[in-house]
């Protein structure tokens, strides 16, 4: 027979265990809800992060100067001008919109204005020089491409080996506040080209969509891969899936969204002027220039008046 005090203590103990289990269950449910919310938030928020030593900046500036000199020696005047213009545009977008408007940029161990100015001119210049060489079907496209890709791969390794005694700069941006606008530009641009092709009976005047997609995706993929392999892109990310998500999303979206528009600019300019910034002897309409560009081949012997 159990005494009253003992029975009371046992009852209280049982009640305590019951309420403890109930509280633990509620805590677990709350933790699960929070984890689900965080996971959903991360799915919508892609973080583009870079970590590099200051030497990386100086090495890249030296490369940009050498690259520009080589282009000028080959009389690629319009190509250089396009690269410089889009470097400025990149900076206005990155600093003006991403940082000042969307507050998506942050930096550690560096000056945000200066670092963004270098980054914008570096990738704005290199990306659009490569794009312009590609869509103009330059006869040395292979050589230019290998030159750029080799640098994107080797520069991070050089900086890591010879500049590791310095404090690394860490810069990142979130994308949830503006990726939707990028997606809208991407869709409208390619949708316009698709509609044009659907109602264009003359095959020579249809836009080569696969060609544009290949350029837009591979240019971004090239330097994203170089940064990833060099330990710069997505530094500090533990999961490979997070790194892969940034790589794939940026490659499909960020440079690619501008391809329909930059191609239209290219056609409009090259219909009237040459690569050397001279007027063409035989100006073309926009549609005639499209047909001419479609007929050109990178490895072909013939050169259009634009490249001549």
Image (tube, rainbow, N blue to C red):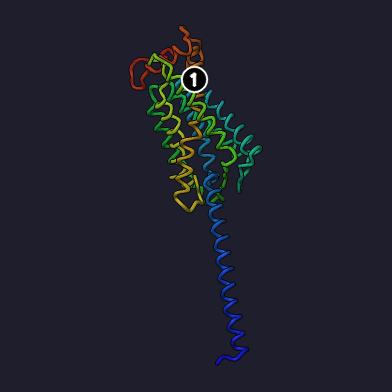
Q: Quadrant of the N terminus?
A: bottom right
Identify the residue at horizontal 45%, vertical 45% (top origin): 244
Crowd rating for badge 1 (residues with CA inside 10 Å; few <14, some 14–19, many 20+): some
Instruction: State the residue in front, 70 or 146.
Output: 146
Spot occupied by residue 44 in the image (x, y as percentages of width and height): 54, 44
Identify the residue at horizontal 46%, vertical 7% (top origin): 282
Instruction: State the residue in front, 25 or 274.
Output: 25
Spot occupied by residue 220 in the image (x, y as percentages of width and height): 46, 35
Seen in the picture, residue 154 relative to 146 is either above or below; the reply is: below
Instruction: State the residue in front, 49 or 12.
Output: 12
Identify the residue at horizontal 55%, vertical 71% (top origin): 21
Residue 130 shows in this picture: yes
In the displayed structure image, the side of residue 130 where residue 84 appears, left or right: right
Spot occupied by residue 151 in the image (x, y as percentages of width and height): 44, 37
In the displayed structure image, the side of residue 282 where residue 26 appears, left or right: right
Furthest residue toward front? 1
Seen in the picture, residue 9 relative to 183 is either above or below; the reply is: below
Location of mark 1 (residue): 266
Q: Quadrant of the C terminus?
A: top left
Q: Secondary structure at mark 1?
A: helix
In which quadrant of the rendered view does residue 100 lie? top right
Identify the residue at horizontal 42%, vertical 35% (top origin): 149
Spot occupied by residue 46 in the image (x, y as percentages of width and height): 53, 44
In the displayed structure image, the side of residue 218 where residue 51 appears, left or right: right
Furthest residue toward right? 100
């Amino acid at each position: 027979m159990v005494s009253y005090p003992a029975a009371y203590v046992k009852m209280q103990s049982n009640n305590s265990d019951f309420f403890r289990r109930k509280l633990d269950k509620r805590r677990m449910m709350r933790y699960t809800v929070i984890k689900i919310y965080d996971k959903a938030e991360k799915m919508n928020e892609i973080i583009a992060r870079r970590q590099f030593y200051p030497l990386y900046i100086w090495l890249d500036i030296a490369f940009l100067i050498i690259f520009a000199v080589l282009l000028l020696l080959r009389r690629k005047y319009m190509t250089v001008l396009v690269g410089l213009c889009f470097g400025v545009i990149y900076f206005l977008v990155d600093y003006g919109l991403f940082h000042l408007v969307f507050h998506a940029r942050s930096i550690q161990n560096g000056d945000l204005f200066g670092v963004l100015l270098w980054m914008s001119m570096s990738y704005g210049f290199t990306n659009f020089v490569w794009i312009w060489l590609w869509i103009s079907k330059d006869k040395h496209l292979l050589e230019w491409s290998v030159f750029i890709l080799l640098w994107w791969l080797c520069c991070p390794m050089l900086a890591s080996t010879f500049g590791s005694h310095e404090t690394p700069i860490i810069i990142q941006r979130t994308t949830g506040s503006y990726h939707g606008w990028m997606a809208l530009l991407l869709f409208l641009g390619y949708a316009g080209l698709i509609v044009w092709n659907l109602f264009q009976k003359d095959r020579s005047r249809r836009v080569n969509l696969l060609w544009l997609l290949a350029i837009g995706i591979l240019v971004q993929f090239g330097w994203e891969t170089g940064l990833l392999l060099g330990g710069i892109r997505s530094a500090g990310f533990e999961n490979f899936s997070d790194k892969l998500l940034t790589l794939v999303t940026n490659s499909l979206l960020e440079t690619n969204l501008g391809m329909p528009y930059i191609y239209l600019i290219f056609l409009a300019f090259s219909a009237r002027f040459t690569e050397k910034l001279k007027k063409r002897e035989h100006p073309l309409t926009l549609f005639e220039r499209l047909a001419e560009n479609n007929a050109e081949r990178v490895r072909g012997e013939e050169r259009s008046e634009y490249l001549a």
